[in-house]
Structures are given as structure tokens and as C-alpha cells.
Amino acid sequence: MDKNDVKARVKKVIAQVLNLDEAEIGDDANFVFDLGADSRQSLELVAAFEEEFDIEMDEDKALEVQNVADAVEFIAQYLD
């Protein structure tokens, strides 16, 4: 799966969990400051990414990811 596919799926998940339009989600958007995610939603995002990509991530490291581009890179590590 290439990075553009990963990015599209990441944005789809973010839009669903945070109830946003995918067009509002920029690559450098910060989950908390730009997209308004709270701590509960951050956990929901991790769970949703795991389900979407059928992976298990290190939750502590996943919660350290701050923006969309970093999330794409982080998730891509699990897909190689």
C-alpha cells in the first residue's frame, strides 16, 4: 500500500472520529490544536486506525503522534 492510500484512509478515519469534512484535514494539521481532538478522541483515533489497517500499534507511541503527516508515517511502519 502506498503512502497516498494510507493518507486517504487516515483522513477518512479522522473525519469519522472527529466528525469533520475530509477537506478540512490538512497534512500538517495538529490533532489537538487544529482538529480539536480531546484525550478521549485521541484514544478513539488510535483504535480506529488499528481497525482500519488491521494492525496493533504501541498505544503510548501512537498517542505521541501530533499531526496527520506523522500519523501516516507512523502507521506506514506497521504496514511494511
Image (tube, rainbow, N blue to C red):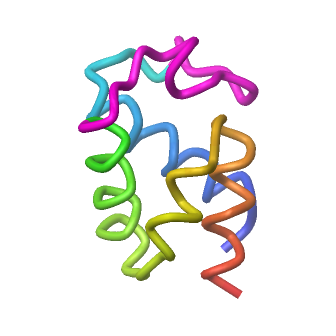
Left or right of 10? Residue 16 is: left
Q: Residue at x 74, y 59 (%)?
A: 73
For the image, the number of numbered tags is 0
- Magenta segment includes 31: yes
- Magenta segment includes 75: no
Q: Position of residue 19 (x, y in %)?
A: 26, 21
Where is 57 relative to 31, above or below? below
Q: Quadrant of the N terminus?
A: bottom right
Q: Residue at x 71, y 87 (%)?
A: 80
Left or right of 28? Residue 37 is: left
Magenta stretch bounds = 23-40
Q: Position of residue 68 (x, y in %)?
A: 64, 37
In this view of the protein, which residue sits in the foreground, 12 or 31? 31
Where is 3 relative to 7, above or below? below
Image quadrant in which you'd find residue 36: top left
Query: Which secondary structure dominates the residues rendered in magenta?
Result: loop
Where is 18 relative to 12, above or below? above
Where is 25 relative to 61, above or below? above
Q: Residue at x 68, y 63 (%)?
A: 74
Q: Position of residue 77 (x, y in %)?
A: 71, 77
